[in-house]
Image (cartoon, rainbow, N blue to C red):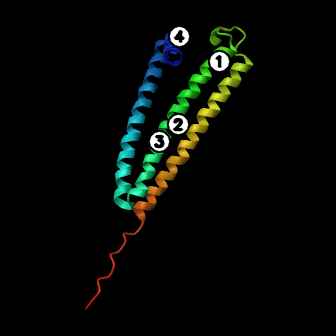
Amino acid sequence: MVPAVVGRPLLVLPPGGAALLLVGLSAGSAGVLLEFAFLTVLNRLLWETDGWKTAEQTGRYAIAFVCGVLAVMGTLCLGVVALALTTGGRDANTDPAGVSAPAKLVAAGVILAVCGIGGWLTWRFVRLLNLTRHAVTQPEPSPPPVPSG
């Protein structure tokens, strides 16, 4: 499916559009790497401020992030397959009558699914940031009083 999702648009796009697509894919890859670098730092911060049980939430978010990225990729691939099935294998862009209604429904479904996954990941990330804010701003526990005498 990767050639259908990535390779095919590069063949039919003008050079400027293909370059923009490649820049977008490269920026997305760099963003994923930066996300995991940030999560590593956040994990260490939570470990130092609130202990390993709180730092464990970073690992749970990382697993959710990977599952979300895989779900988006799967949704896009299923969308391409569904689009190919609705157009009978013809290229949807070459149809003189425009895009068919089933193809529009497939596109709308893919957009809704990807936005839903993005919203779910954003909600999880905001929860992790709130947990971090709470761990960093809570007062340092005072040591127990030393018994005198």
Mark 3 surroundings within 10 Å by alpha-carbon count, few (fewer than 14), some (14 through 19), many (20 or more): few
Cβ–Cβ under 8 Å for marks 1 and 2: no
Which residue, given by chain and number where applicable, does mark 3 sit on?
63
What residue is drawn where x is 64% and y is 9%?
89
Which residue, given by chain and number where applicable, does mark 2 sit on?
68
- Residue sitting nearer the eye, 143 or 53: 53
Where 64 sits versus 139, above or below? above
Q: What type is the residue that disc 1 sits on? A: Leu
Q: What type is the residue that disc 2 sits on? A: Gly
Where 134 sits versus 5, above or below? below
Q: Helix, strand, or loop for circle 2?
A: helix
Q: What type is the residue that disc 3 sits on? A: Ile
Q: Helix, strand, or loop for circle 4?
A: helix
Which residue, given by chain and number where applicable, does mark 4 sit on?
12
Percent position of residue 49, x then y: 36, 60
Name the N-terminal-most of marks 2 and 3: 3
Percent position of residue 70, x then y: 51, 32
Q: Is residue 12 left or right of residue 101?
A: left
Name the N-terminal-most of marks 2 and 4: 4
Q: CA distance from mark 2 to mark 4?
A: 29 Å
Q: Helix, strand, or loop for circle 3?
A: helix
Eye-nearest disc, 4 or 3? 3
Q: CA distance from mark 2 to mark 3?
A: 8 Å
Cβ–Cβ under 8 Å for marks 2 and 3: no
Which residue, given by chain and number where applicable, does mark 1 sit on?
83
Name the N-terminal-most of marks 1 and 2: 2
Q: What type is the residue that disc 4 sits on? A: Val
Name the N-terminal-most of marks 4 and 3: 4
